[in-house]
Amino acid sequence: MRLLLLSNSTNYRSGYLDHAMADVRSFLGRARRLAFVPFALKDQAGYAAKAQQRFAREGVEVTAVTEDGGAATLAAAEAVFVGGGNTFRLLHLLQRSGLLELLRRQAQQGMPYLGASAGTNVVAPTIMTTNDMPIVQPASFTALGLVPFQINPHYQDPPSGSTHMGETREDRLREYLEENDRLVVGLREGAWLEVEGEAVRLSGRAGARLFQRGRAPEDVEPGTSLAPWLGAGAP
């Protein structure tokens, strides 16, 4: 199984996927036919055109996955890219179209899976650690389950000196852990995860914060293997 899971598709002061494209190209290797899943946005045609234009610069042909013809598109592709947007809408349409199981099976069989934001969220066992509002109601929160941990893309640390009295991202993830006992990887902007089989490595230009029930959050830097947190116990 090969996964490249981006926290975000657009970084500050850079174009669409520019901050990660070198790693994306390396990840895709010789693949030149990419299936793009645009379900997380309402304007799927516009979203697909954006991906097609960006990957055309890399010599990669992008075909949009649709609800009615998605199975054939995925079958003909050499890799898949699941784009960002609203995670609830993405999961809802994957479930409704019947493509969730197919996508899981193809990724497990080795098709390279590129995800960004919502597309990264759905790789986890559930979407319970997304930042998004539930604008639609999926059949369940159960997602692809390609990794054994939860992911929180776009993780933001509490700003120093802020007078905001509402919940921080850390507060919300602690609440998740009050009801669930599963590692949560908070991916900061500009960070991504590289998954090869059971090996998981943090990459990119920013770190991550790891949350576990009953333990203080831990910061990890790019280049760190997550193996110690996925084995018998945390370091």
Image (cartoon, rainbow, N blue to C red):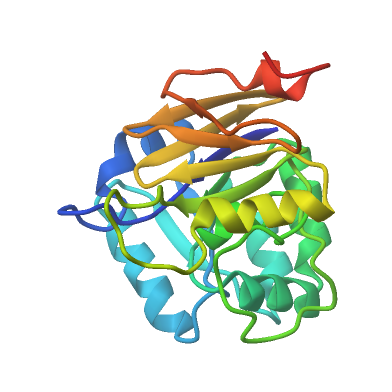
Identify the residue at horizontal 81%, vertical 72% (top origin): 98
Residue 116 visible: no
Q: Position of residue 81 (x, y in %)?
A: 53, 54
Quadrant where the N terminus is found in the figure = top right
Identify the residue at horizontal 65%, vertical 57% (top origin): 129
Left or right: 56 as drawn, with respect to 138: left
For residue 226, what is the image quadrant?
top right
> Looking at the image, which is closer to me, 73 or 124?
124
> Looking at the image, which is closer to me, 234 or 9?
234
**Residue furthest left as drawn:** 13
Q: Position of residue 180 (x, y in %)?
A: 82, 50
Identify the residue at horizontal 75%, vertical 48% (top origin): 177
Quadrant where the C terminus is found in the figure = top right
Identify the residue at horizontal 70%, vertical 36% (top origin): 212
Q: Position of residue 218 (x, y in %)?
A: 55, 28
Left or right: 153 as drawn, with respect to 226: left
Image height check: is 38 above or below 146?
below
